[in-house]
Image (cartoon, rainbow, N blue to C red):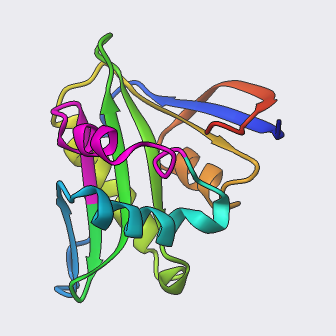
Amino acid sequence: MYLAWVTYLEMKRRPLSIMADPSDPAIHIAREQPGPAEYLVLFRLVGDRFDWDLRTRMSPPDLAAHLNSADTLLFVLRVDGAALGFCEFEKRPDGDMQLMFCGIAAAIEGRRLGRRLLLTSLDRAWAEQPNRIWLHTDTEDSPKALPLYLSLGFEQFDRRYEDVTDF
């Protein structure tokens, strides 16, 4: 068991202005459906330093099914063609959408690319017309995550001290 503070956030409507600055042609953000091996390389690149392991514990067939599901939206940030970040959303049966993972490689931090990735991904996720988009972040995630989510219009709806072993 591993306990941490978990903050639950939601965005109930698409912000009026959510578009990111598309001025750098070396930066490309698009919805992709990588295979399990390619996905896991990116997942580990972004998440290993935060102990993300949810997807690494899935069997290859289950991960492939997840990645190919119409309910999974995966937006990949590429810099000069290299996959260096991603946002992963899951549609829920109740009409909500959960932001499961969002992050960038440590090597590109400080260039506001995480913000750009999240803004662009949110814009495209809202095009699916969910009731709301929600997420949880905990004290083991990047210390920049919670302030970024709040600055983009997410609002806190719960905070709990809980086991994050299976996050």
Dividing the image into 4 quarters, which one contains the N terminus? top right
Question: Is 83 positioned to the left or the right of 99 in the image?
Answer: left
Q: Nearer the viewer, residue 123 or 73?
A: 73
**Taking 43 as reference, is 71 left or right?**
left
- Residue at (49, 66) in percent of width and height: 44
| Residue located at (82% from left, 40% from top) | 2
Which picture quadrant has residue 129?
top left
Q: Position of residue 102 (x, y in %)?
A: 45, 54
Q: Nearer the viewer, residue 154 or 87?
A: 87
Q: Is residue 111 above or below residue 28?
A: below
Give the answer, above or below, for where 89 lies relative to 148: above
- How many marks can you see? 0
Q: In which quadrant is the C terminus drawn?
A: top right
Residue 25: x and y, percent?
A: 16, 85
The magenta-colored residue range is: 54-75
Residue 68 quadrant: top left
Image location of residue 95, percent across then percent down:
28, 15
Asked if the magenta segment contains residue 119, the reply would be no
Q: Confirm whether residue 20 shows in the render.
A: no
Would you identify the image quadrant in which residue 144 lies? Answer: bottom right
| Whether residue 95 can be seen here | yes
Identified at 77% across, 32% down, the residue is 163
Between 160 and 157, which is closer to the camera in this rendering?
Answer: 160
